[in-house]
Structures are given as C-alpha cells and as structure tokens.
C-alpha cells in the first residue's frame, strides 16, 4: 500500500464536552481539504482504498471510533486514538471546550511499474 494523501483537520465542541463530536468535526475539516479525483481519472475503485485516521484529544477513551469511522465516505476505515489536542477549561462556569486534531491518510495498492514519467 502506498500513501496517496495526507490531510489534517481540527474540530471542537465548545459547550458539550463531547470528544467524539470534536473528533468528527476534525475529520470533516480534513476531508473538506481534499479531492481524490485519481479514482475517476485512473479507474481505481474506492473500495480498494484504506483510510487511516489518527485522532488526538486529551481523553482518547471518550471517543467512539465507530462513529468517527462512519464519517468517512469511502474506503476501509481504521481509527487510532492518541493523547493530544487541547481542553480549554472555564473555571468560572465549570466547563471545558474540547479541541481535537485529525490526520487522515489514504492508502492504495499501486504498482509503481504502472507509472512512467513523461
């Protein structure tokens, strides 16, 4: 498998303290930065694509990976959680804003011998 794209995104949940919502918004942000026209242009099947998502939040145990994987419109999804992101605590109102970051990598089984520089 060869990595064909890497996109990054950020997302937040300012009021609900929902780590999954922030993670999904980070994935949405990353997806809005990319367009994989090579599938249409070169005849590859989206089903053959592997999509590896890394989500960083302060409390990874609070992210539902199945929900995050469901945000991906194509390919086989694999979601990994790591500690990162940012929580901003409001001590006055006893709340926290959750900020997540996402890296979305797309992989495809491409034979380099099929490509020739012109």
Image (cartoon, rainbow, N blue to C red):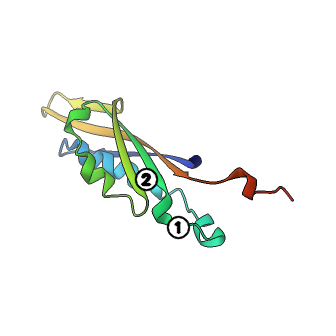
Q: Which of the pair 42/68 is nearer the observer?
A: 42
Quadrant holding the C terminus: bottom right
Residue 11 relative to residue 9: left or right: left
Which residue is labeled 2 in the image? 29
Q: Which mark is residue 45?
A: 1
Residue shown at the point (24%, 41%) measured from the top left: 63
Q: Position of residue 64 (x, y in %)?
A: 22, 45
Residue shown at the point (32%, 53%) measured from the top left: 69
- Label 2: few (<14), some (14–19) or many (≥20) C-alpha neighbours in 10 Å: some
Count of marks placed on residues:
2
Q: Which of the pair 96/1 is nearer the observer?
A: 1
Residue shown at the point (46%, 52%) measured from the top left: 50
Q: Position of residue 6 (x, y in %)?
A: 55, 46
- Label 1: few (<14), some (14–19) or many (≥20) C-alpha neighbours in 10 Å: few
Q: Position of residue 24 (x, y in %)?
A: 32, 51
Circle 2 sits in a helix, a strand or a loop, which is it?
Answer: helix
User: How far apart are labels 2 and 1 at the CA level?
Assistant: 24 Å
Residue shown at the point (48%, 59%) measured from the top left: 32
Circle 1 sits in a helix, a strand or a loop, which is it?
Answer: loop
Q: Position of residue 102 (x, y in %)?
A: 41, 42
């Amino acid at each position: 498998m060869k990595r064909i794209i890497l996109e990054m995104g950020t997302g937040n949940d300012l009021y609900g303290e929902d780590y999954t919502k922030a993670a999904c918004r980070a994935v949405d942000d990353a997806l809005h930065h990319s367009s994989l026209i090579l599938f249409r242009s070169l005849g590859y099947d989206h089903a053959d694509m592997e999509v590896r998502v890394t989500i960083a939040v302060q409390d990874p145990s609070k992210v539902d990976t199945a929900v995050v994987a469901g945000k991906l419109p194509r390919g086989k999804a694999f979601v990994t959680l790591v500690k990162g992101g940012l929580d901003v605590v409001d001590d006055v109102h006893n709340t926290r804003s959750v900020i997540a970051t996402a890296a979305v990598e797309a992989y495809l089984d491409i034979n380099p011998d099929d490509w020739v520089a012109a």
